[in-house]
Image (cartoon, coloured by chain):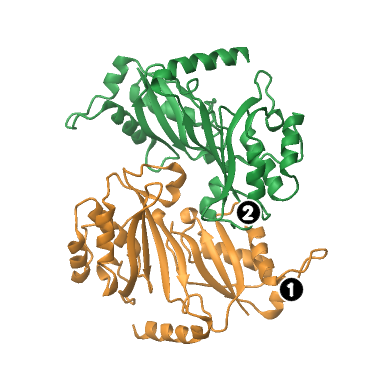
Chain colours: A orange, B green
Amino acid sequence: MRIRLDIAYDGSHFRGWARQPDLRTVQGTLEDAMQRILRSEARLVVAGRTDTGVHATGQVAHVDIDDEVWAAATRPRRGHEASDPVDVFARRIMGVLGGYSDVAVRRTSLAPEGFDARFSAVWRRYEYRVADLVAGYDPLERHRTTSVRAELDVDQMDAAARSLIGLHDFAAYCKAREDATTIRTLLEFDWRRDGDGVLVANIKADAFCHSMVRALVGACVAVGEGRLDEEDLVALRDAGTRTSEFKVLAARGLTLTEVGYPAPELLAQRAEQTRARRVLG
Amino acid sequence: MRIRLDIAYDGSHFRGWARQPDLRTVQGTLEDAMQRILRSEARLVVAGRTDTGVHATGQVAHVDIDDEVWAAATRPRRGHEASDPVDVFARRIMGVLGGYSDVAVRRTSLAPEGFDARFSAVWRRYEYRVADLVAGYDPLERHRTTSVRAELDVDQMDAAARSLIGLHDFAAYCKAREDATTIRTLLEFDWRRDGDGVLVANIKADAFCHSMVRALVGACVAVGEGRLDEEDLVALRDAGTRTSEFKVLAARGLTLTEVGYPAPELLAQRAEQTRARRVLG
């Protein structure tokens, strides 16, 4: 059986999502917790492999569990009321992780037929938080907000962000990787100033290439400072090569907030398409 | 001259506000930073002496600085534009504290005649955050939110909180201290569920006795769980003795958000009144 996990974490003290020997990662921490409960190997497949320091409120993963292993692990304890084994699993993982853990399984559920956390996903949404001199510096938000020593023009940033939307080659905003395409569909990209003055970017795409969000928000901050303008960002994108005209911003401001999946009846079809495209692309 | 400092901190890694030998405290950290800049002793007087683990977004303090010391410390550096020395002071403190510090001086300003951060204050406002099973657990908010494993009834909690408002002896909700009165005027006390589902208490009083906010919110959580009701909280208050019927909640959920001062022309008068009352009381 396949279980979907909805996951949140403060990435500050993780070396990213992906399991690595001798390093504390989100995948490693969760797999170790599940293995303690299942007394059996557990491998997570994830929608967004976040980098070191990146946070999540809406990460999605799945794990395949043998029926007998599952039945043994989620059996209600003697004297406890029988409850939904899927709920029991989430609670047991949280029990192993301990109180006030920096990673949480917010929900476990039976995955619908054909669901694959990675290959079924149709879009990912991130949020990036920047505190400028208008917002001021708030120590309680420092772990998930990047500070810049300037006063930023949010209207210019918002206009510049929106001008980049669409199906394009984002090579200028990606850290190159040999086997990966940099053609992506940017579905949403906008900026607002929140109630506390912090600038928040909302950014949604079918998928992101490496460091793409942090490069795009860095380019927008250069616009907010008046060093670049909307036309520059489009021209840089169309030139297709990396530039030093803007900074790739720090991981601390970045949070994966949501992953989109098609309706259950279209799931299997979607996963097939994605796999085929990745192979061709 | 007297400088007012508006201060924010994440209390997680501080042993409270008040300076203590060999312990990291907010007062100690800020005084050390100021002394490096002033090359002279600096003593802070604060509105709310917060306990270990308690946070602040709106803490207020003052420091008295000798005119010559001030002039030397805030002189614009060679080649820098002359700017308001009061602004320069806040920036220099932040420079000494370093990037992404867990304490921040958000503003420094010249204190009006008669201003005393402690004795002029007419009220203090705190916020307390509780995540129940409805809100779920968010690792990114764990440093400033207390988790409870129950579903809480916010309407009952709000009604119970409001029933405690007024001038009363709050001995039942205070940790006793020999020389301190427990008679306080509770000006506001209410609960709401925020957008993210977290329960937030707003609580404002002329002053608070020791652990009073954490006891009051603990009593309200017992109401939210259905273990106590509004009448119980009033009866407990009027009985005037400490009880084990509710828990004093953890410091992590508590933030000092605002301190109220009278209009400048009434400041000196207010400080005199407070000092007189403290001596009599």
The structure residue drawn at horizontal position 69% and vertical position 19%, both measured from the top left corner, is: B178
Q: Chain of mark 1?
A: A
Q: Position of residue A256 (x, y in %)?
A: 44, 63
Which amino acid type corresponds to the residue marked 1 in the rendered image? Answer: Ala
What is the spatial separation of the Cα atoms under label 2 and label 1, in whole angstroms? 29 Å
Q: Nearer the viewer, residue A193 or A221?
A: A193
Is A56 positioned to the left or the right of A224 in the image?
right
**Residue in front for this viewpoint, A267 or B19:** A267
Q: Which residue is mark 2?
A: B132
Q: Is residue A22 visible?
A: no
The residue pinned by badge 1 equals A72
Q: Nearer the viewer, mark 2 or mark 1?
A: 2
* Chain that bears disc 2: B
- The residue lying at 32 percent from left, 43 percent from top is A134
As drawn, the label of residue B278 is: none
Q: Specify the quadrant that holds the C terminus of chain A.
A: bottom left
Q: Secondary structure at mark 1?
A: helix
Amino acid bearing label 2: Asp
Q: Do the residues at pointers 2 and 1 share their chain?
A: no
